[in-house]
Image (spheres, coloured by chain):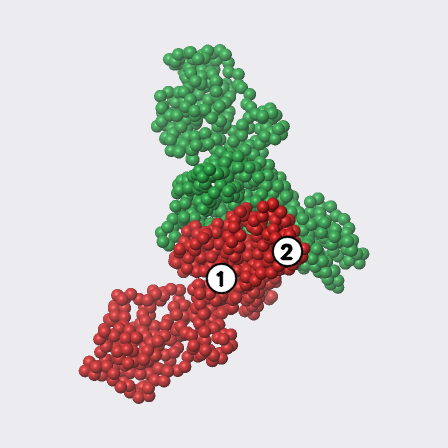
Chain colours: A green, B red
Amino acid sequence: MRWSQLYVPTLREDPADADAASHRLLVRAGYVRQLAAGHYSLLPLAARVRARIVAVVREEMERIGAQEFLLPALHPAELWRRTGRWESMGEEMFRLTDRKGAEQALGMTHEEVFAHLAEELRSYRQLPQTWYQFQTKFRDEARPRSGLLRVREFTMKDSYSFDLDEAGMARSFEAHRLAYLRIFERLGLPAFGVRASSGAMGGSGSVEFMSPSAAGEDLVVRCPGCGYAANTEKALSALPAVADPAERTERTGPAEQTERTDRSDQAGTFAVEEFATPGARGIEELAERHGIAPERQLKTLVQVVDGALTLVLLRGDHALVEQKLLDALGASAARPATAEEIAAALGASPGSLGPLGGHGLPVLADEALRGRTGLTCGANRDGFHLRGVSIGRDVRVTRWADLREVTAGEPCAECGAALEVLRTIEVGHIFQLGRRYTEALGVAVAGPAGERVVPLMGSYGIGVERLLAALVEAHHDERGIRWPAAVAPFDLVLTVLPDRGGAVAEAAERLCGELGAAGVRVLLDDRAERPGVKFADAELIGVPWRLTLGARGLAAGTAELTARADGSTRELGLDAAVPELRALAG
Amino acid sequence: MRWSQLYVPTLREDPADADAASHRLLVRAGYVRQLAAGHYSLLPLAARVRARIVAVVREEMERIGAQEFLLPALHPAELWRRTGRWESMGEEMFRLTDRKGAEQALGMTHEEVFAHLAEELRSYRQLPQTWYQFQTKFRDEARPRSGLLRVREFTMKDSYSFDLDEAGMARSFEAHRLAYLRIFERLGLPAFGVRASSGAMGGSGSVEFMSPSAAGEDLVVRCPGCGYAANTEKALSALPAVADPAERTERTGPAEQTERTDRSDQAGTFAVEEFATPGARGIEELAERHGIAPERQLKTLVQVVDGALTLVLLRGDHALVEQKLLDALGASAARPATAEEIAAALGASPGSLGPLGGHGLPVLADEALRGRTGLTCGANRDGFHLRGVSIGRDVRVTRWADLREVTAGEPCAECGAALEVLRTIEVGHIFQLGRRYTEALGVAVAGPAGERVVPLMGSYGIGVERLLAALVEAHHDERGIRWPAAVAPFDLVLTVLPDRGGAVAEAAERLCGELGAAGVRVLLDDRAERPGVKFADAELIGVPWRLTLGARGLAAGTAELTARADGSTRELGLDAAVPELRALAG
């Protein structure tokens, strides 16, 4: 391929709106152009990289016995209604009405359509089945961002397994887990599996694959000791207990404004006391002005969970993970209550809230609060707090759950080492779905004794263009992209230096032909540009090797081989160039 | 690949709703399943055939220097508004509103998006450019039918060329025309190019590629003499002139009901006369009851063209081609006027209509009516007709155009041979678009002298799944599909006959491995089915060769090789099987 005939609209400057490195470089190096927020056109270089990624993913799917399908992108609403997801997918699903007035969805994922096909399965002898496709997914993201990292339209390799029993589902899941790890390794993408929430997908377990990157949207907790890794949506740690004082706490607020409450003092060694905290409206302010350490405060949040007001209790220095809240309650949507909703329910403003009193709301408490005594919380009276509050005695907890965000440095629950928190890009997600979809769609086969068996399903997804962007995140420097050999759009740029007689161009053409015949993907830079421009462009687009041929080298029978990875350069004898370069090619 | 591990849900019976052979066979042989009208899931066998078609099309695109892109399927309405097609595409375009309230279209085609990308072209030195993709197209067809032949969602290879001048556009067009013919030839699809209307695409010329089939929706006129071929939307013929009588016609109607009209008789040899035709409401009835040959009648149609009432005149025995009407007027939509609209405009009912009188409507006449005299037409008075009508003298024609449908047996306009009319499937369509899209989207480059040049565009499309179905239409028999070697999902079915000891299965496994290593695509029929079922299934799915291995043959060192094309069978020595079969493989 000649550079002069390849459409590579490189830009001198970084695009103004690009936040992530991959976004900036893919635009600047002429790989992609934005059509609209979240919709990108892939130009020839990106299409080449994408094809190589697709080929690797396809090989690894075939290796685990998955069969390739291609299903429609536009789905009848009726199918999504049968699993309840027509409603639950909310605004993220693109919907339309066709000329006959029928409602349609653009596929965000294909559990429904694949399970619908599986209705034709008849016998346990046909199981397991693993079906996959490369198909466009459409998701009406609230905030498309970071170039190809979060878009509204992308290619997904999605696969779906159908098994007769739990053990079979676990085997299909494990086969995919290993296949995904092989895919990332072959592509040259640093990535590892983490335990994750199954979210809107449902089911009994899921693993996300994460690639560390500053451009990532996910936080992952990882243990350098034992390898434990989990999304913060799911991560646990062995939090050291807080030593609550065994005696009554000292008064730290202005004494004249407090009043003794009338509670009995059975469970703790101190009673609940209201005290005035004028102007102290948060955990931090209470700590600063009244000397109450955050970990000895009770944080009271009011959330609207699937439409119902719920009190959520956390340790004062802990943050709520919304997905943990949803998972704990099996809910699909949560949001903080408005100030109006809070005032109506508790009679106070945020900053003075607490779980005591006759509010009648369910109280969900984080596990880290179990057995805690002598805590401080809001009094549900603006400007007042309560101290001496004991969980259990004073607060009736409706439900306990792990709700809090694990932070860096906490001890690993499995080995005790200090946990790290990493920013990552999710590059794959696999789910054990169980029977949710097969039951909803009436998938059933005859078992060995003729009995009716509803197969268990797994679902497995990799976003192709996100992989492409994640690879750039992992492999770039200030001069441009540095593609791993396995996915580079070309193995080699053959840079022709200016030459009066044309002998260099001619020799380069010949060499290019020989390399092509040997299976090396060569981009012949035949443009009438200065050498500096050619070198910079080759670095920007990120081809792993550059071979530079000039008149002097040609006369000596050599060319200069430069590695994009480290910039190292060496002389290469033209006689041995083809076999040497073939050995280097990805 | 083992048949036991491949999902091929063959059916014993033809599906009830299948009209076309390809529809019937692709469903029955387990290639496709309908998700909804016009939306099909491709199962593993179909995905394999599709991949082979895609590979051939891609190779031929690369061969003509086209560069692969991948553009979004969801487009902002704004882009389509700039070319006027947001409005003109009408109900066939799927539209939706996203969560932010922005209007979007699902791409029916990609002229707008590719031309939008081309806005970045700067210099004539960058031209020509030819860009292509394989991308899903969405079209809200009024009547999806015939399985994969007319659907609402399909993969299209669409390419777009940008050239500096007309000669360049013609070169790009010709390169595509030849590439398409090579594609059809390589795939084994009988197809030929025909002149076609550019329809909603606009532009200066187009060629459709047609594959003859009873399941086709298009009629094509073809000359067996000189090779002239055109869609009936565009076809011409050398129609012999009708000899109009040189004298006044005899009265054939009941004399007492006619009355002499007051027209002068300058141009013809007879005057216009009204006569009563009670109950004769059409061309045929007028011919039967009053002896007026259809070719001597004037057919008057009232059409609503882009909202305006228009009279359309044809010879009595000729049929209107709606696309010719649209092309003649540069209009985008036409429909017959309603009886109410006609009565309001002409004061009469269909069956008594004519172009005379002070109706004030534009009159569009078919070329075959030029110079005709002494014709009969409706009197715009129910139950009455006029005779002695001469075009020009009595009828003021606003515009002449070719509007009629050419029928079989008419003489070729180029060589005089009798034309054939064939039913065909459109398998490709290429357009010279000129500057319509580049101008609308502001594409311009600097020419050699620095002047502003708006490039000329071409657009070229092949529907991938329609090709797959057209191949089945062209290659099947009563027992199933007969894939051409180039696209078959497998080259060979290796059928294992029942055998007690397992030696046959073992030998088949080994042979299968050797064939696979030699590049032969083998499907090993290892199922526990009767030989008859295995043979019938192999014929149904249409694999070109079947090798049958049994205990007796194994002992003798032979297997039986059967050709799907003609059912012929011969013995094959197992020693030479691998090289022989490799030579047969596609």
Residue that label 1 marks: B477
Q: Residue at coordinates 39% horizontally, 22% vertically from top-left?
A: A380
| Chain for disc number 1 | B
Q: Residue at coordinates 53% horizontally, 52% vertically from top-left?
A: B531
Residue B378 image point, x, y percent: 27, 76
Q: Which amino acid, mark 1? A: Asp
Q: Which amino acid, mark 2? A: Thr
**What is the residue that sits farthest to the right in this orientation?**
A556
Residue B451 image point, x, y percent: 56, 65
Image quarter of residue B58: bottom right
Residue B16 visible in the snapshot: yes
Mark 1 or mark 2, whichever is nearer to me: 2
- Circle 2: element type: strand
Q: Callout 2: 10 Å neighbours few (<14), some, many (20+)?
A: many
Image quarter of residue B170: bottom right
Query: Eyeballing the image, is A66 above or below A312?
Result: below
Sooner in the amino-acid sequence: mark 1 or mark 2: 1
Position of the C terminus of chain B, as image quadrant, is: bottom right
Residue that label 2 marks: B558
Residue B7 image point, x, y percent: 51, 48
Residue B581 image point, x, y percent: 63, 57
Q: Are marks 1 and 2 in contact (CB under 8 Å)?
A: no
Query: Eyeballing the image, is B375 above or below A293?
Result: below
Task: Give whichever of A576, B69 is nearer the camera.
Answer: A576
Query: Eyeballing the image, is B208 above or below B383?
Result: above
Counting every numbered tag in the picture gives: 2
Q: Residue at coordinates 41% horizontally, 30% vertically from top-left?
A: A303
- Circle 1: element type: strand
